[in-house]
């Protein structure tokens, strides 16, 4: 029976993998050859940094547990888990990534959100929240932005649907501040931004949010999100499919310079609307 995936589960899974490998008298290099798994990937699994795929588990069982399916039976899985329950895994990867590419379909991606914008988003749900719960969620979201402040911050690319710019979250003043925050990050070369204008029509990322991450010494991953759900994909074929969709959408988007010009223009519209509201409340 599959078990829920989290850092502690992966650590225990890796420890058991290492114990059985050593009991069989095999080095990582030897097991990688027998199981037909790269030694680097095997090392990451033993360290609890990577979740093995179903095929990985089957190969490990054939190599270490003939006649038993231990690793397959206890394969950590993300099936059916909600974003709130497992986003910590995606957040963990986000802090390790050397390159991040994100798509924002209807909202500014969390790592780019200002405090005022994030407060509006986090309080928009149907269920009431206590002040403590709201503050905890807000702190967690704002902490994510620090990944862009580090000296060795990752290369960060973002594609924003034009709907993100036009959807008035929190009022004109909040939107003006949010869009100008994105512009400042781009001008300081912290991020590279591309807008998918309405004129493009249908494109490959219409189905939902996706975040792609690359690492110095680990295979890339993809995080995809839908309504009240999300999943981290590590399977190479799924990651490549997400990368291809992202690349196709990037080809339809405005250039970095054109995108910044549009964002500045929309921010100016919000500024004007905010001033009018202040003059005629």
Image (spheres, helix red, strand yellow):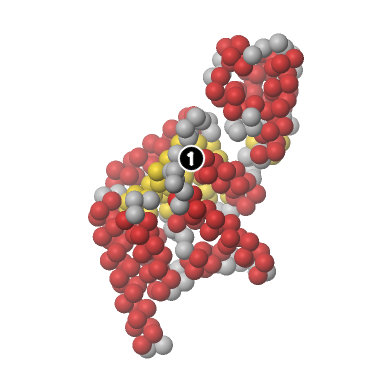
Q: Residue, x 72% and y 12% (percent of image)?
A: 24
Return the residue found at the far bottom. 280
Residue 187 lies in what quarter of the image? bottom left
Is residue 198 depicted above or below 79 in this figure?
below
- Indicate the quadrant where residue 126 lies: bottom right
x, y percent for residue 103: 42, 49
Most extreme residue toward the front, as rendered?
A: 151
**Viewer-proximal residue among 9 and 62:** 9
Q: Position of residue 50 (x, y in %)?
A: 59, 32
Q: Relative to 151, is 133 on the left or the right?
A: right
For label 1, the residue is 97
Which of 26 and 250 lies nearest the eye of the viewer?
26
Q: Quadrant of the N terminus?
A: top right
Foreground residue among 49 and 149: 149
- Can residue 84 be seen? yes
Q: Residue placed at 53% from the left, 44% from the top?
A: 95
- x and y percentages locating residue 198 in the rendered image: 31, 57
* Residue at image location 45% in from the left, 52% down from the top: 149
Q: Say above or below: 164 vs 194.
A: below
């Amino acid at each position: 029976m599959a078990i829920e995936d989290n850092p502690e589960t992966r650590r225990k899974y890796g420890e058991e993998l290492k114990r059985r490998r050593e009991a069989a008298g095999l080095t990582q290099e030897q097991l990688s050859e027998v199981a037909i798994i790269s030694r680097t990937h095997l090392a990451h699994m033993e360290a609890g940094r990577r979740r093995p795929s179903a095929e990985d588990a089957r190969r490990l069982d054939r190599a270490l547990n003939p006649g038993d399916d231990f690793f397959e039976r206890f394969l950590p899985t993300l099936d059916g888990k909600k974003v709130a329950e497992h986003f910590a895994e995606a957040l963990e990867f986000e802090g390790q990534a050397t390159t991040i590419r994100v798509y924002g379909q209807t909202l500014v991606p969390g790592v780019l959100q200002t405090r005022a914008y994030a407060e509006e988003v986090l309080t928009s749900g149907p269920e009431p929240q206590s002040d403590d719960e709201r503050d905890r969620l807000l702190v967690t979201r704002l902490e994510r932005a620090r990944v862009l402040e580090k000296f060795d911050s990752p290369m960060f690319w973002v594609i924003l649907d034009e709907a993100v710019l036009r959807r008035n979250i929190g009022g004109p003043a909040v939107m003006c501040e949010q869009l100008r925050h994105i512009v400042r990050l781009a001008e300081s070369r912290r991020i590279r931004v591309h807008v998918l204008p309405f004129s493009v029509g249908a494109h490959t990322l219409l189905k939902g949010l996706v975040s792609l991450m690359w690492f110095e010494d680990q295979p890339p991953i993809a995080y995809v999100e839908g309504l009240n759900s999300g999943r981290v994909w590590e399977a190479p074929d799924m990651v490549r499919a997400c990368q291809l969709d992202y690349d196709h959408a990037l080809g339809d988007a405005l250039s970095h310079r054109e995108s910044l010009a549009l964002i500045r223009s929309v921010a100016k519209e919000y500024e004007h609307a905010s001033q009018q509201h202040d003059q005629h409340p």
